[in-house]
Amino acid sequence: MCYAFAGSSLKRRTGGKLMYQTNTKVRWVDFVMISLGCALYAFGLVKINIANKLAEGGITGITLIIRYWLQIDPALSTIILNLPLIVIGYRYLGRTALIYTLFGTLSLSFFIWFWQRIPIQINIHHDLFIAGLLAGLLGGTGSGIVYRFGGTTGGTDIVARIFEKNQGISMGKTLLTLDAVVLSASLSYVDLRRMMYTLLASYVFSKIVTFTLEGAYAARGVIIISAQHEQIAQDIMQHLGRGVSYLHAMGGYSKKEYQAIYCVVSPSELMLLKHIVSDWDQRAFVSILSVNEVLGEGFSYDAPKRKLNLGGKSKKTY
């Protein structure tokens, strides 16, 4: 079986094979919302960060360093830096994620170019505290919308995903390390005072992204009850790289016995998990729980190296 989970719906043919049915409505909504998110993020970057000489983490932070030292427009350097990463990360993204990442990267580049040419000024009377709050608010809201609708803007997300798949290092640790390196390098053109306000912006950014994704916690516990529990569990382990457990359950009314699936995933993986469940059983019962703390593989300590087997019984591609 082979399918992409975003922007399309699938129906099973006789014999268990899948046929594609393009769902243009869902796909265009995703594209529109990713564009909106990129527009908000770029607005905050241009009108708050750049205008008040605040730094930034990740690839965007590198573009600001390049802008200062080489006078290259961040709209251009965003594409230059991201395209090689997208090519390298192709095998880790999957077809749909690749399309959305390319679109997000190009949208971000366009809106950075666009806002630099629109004569809008936000007068905050040079108050860096307000600048830090606004930068985090606008950037976090924009990025949260992009992530919410299955997109990314490329950059360090791709690098973090490669390290997670190859080395078993969690994405959070990789992203934090890369941001720390970029922010340290940014001290070459911003003073320590502005760097502290940049850290404030980064803190607000992370909280707003979490709020936008409705992920107040680091993980989600998911209970799935379905007659297709074996197939669903196999795809969760294969495509999400998450472990599952079977729980013995009995219907209170029907008295029927079931094998319920329990697994823990990150908030960003919820959409893919929902598509996996839906493609096997649209009548499955799914309960999503907020998890205050997770101790174990892939969360509190590194997961072992995994090689995803895409050549087994299931050949679904996300």
Image (cartoon, rainbow, N blue to C red):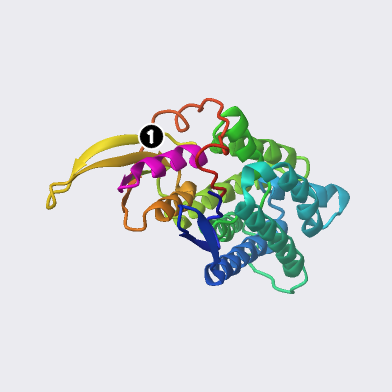
Disc 1 crowd, CA 10 A, few/some/many (<14, 14-19, 20+): some
Residue at 66 percent of width and 59 percent of height: 104
What x and y, as percent, mark residue 64?
76, 51
10 or 211: nearer the viewer:
10
Q: Secondary structure at mark 1?
A: loop
121 or 297: nearer the viewer:
297
Badge 1 is on which residue?
Answer: 294
Measured along the vertical axis of the image, is residue 40 above or below residue 216? below
Residue 278: quadrant of the picture: bottom left
Viewer can see residue 152: no
Q: Horizontally, is 130 left or right of 222 in the view?
A: right
Residue at 42 percent of width and 34 percent of height: 243
287 or 197: nearer the viewer:
287
Q: Is residue 161 magenta?
A: no
Q: Horizontally, is 314 left or right of 60 in the view?
A: left
What x and y, as percent, mark residue 149?
53, 60
Q: Residue furthest bottom?
A: 119
Measured along the vertical axis of the image, is residue 51 above or below residue 169? below
Q: Kindly identify the amino acid type of the residue bearing the numbered disc 1.
A: Val
Residue at 77 percent of width and 54 percent of height: 79
Q: Horizontally, is 173 left or right of 181 in the view?
A: left
Residue 6: quadrant of the picture: bottom right
Span colored in magenta: 223-240
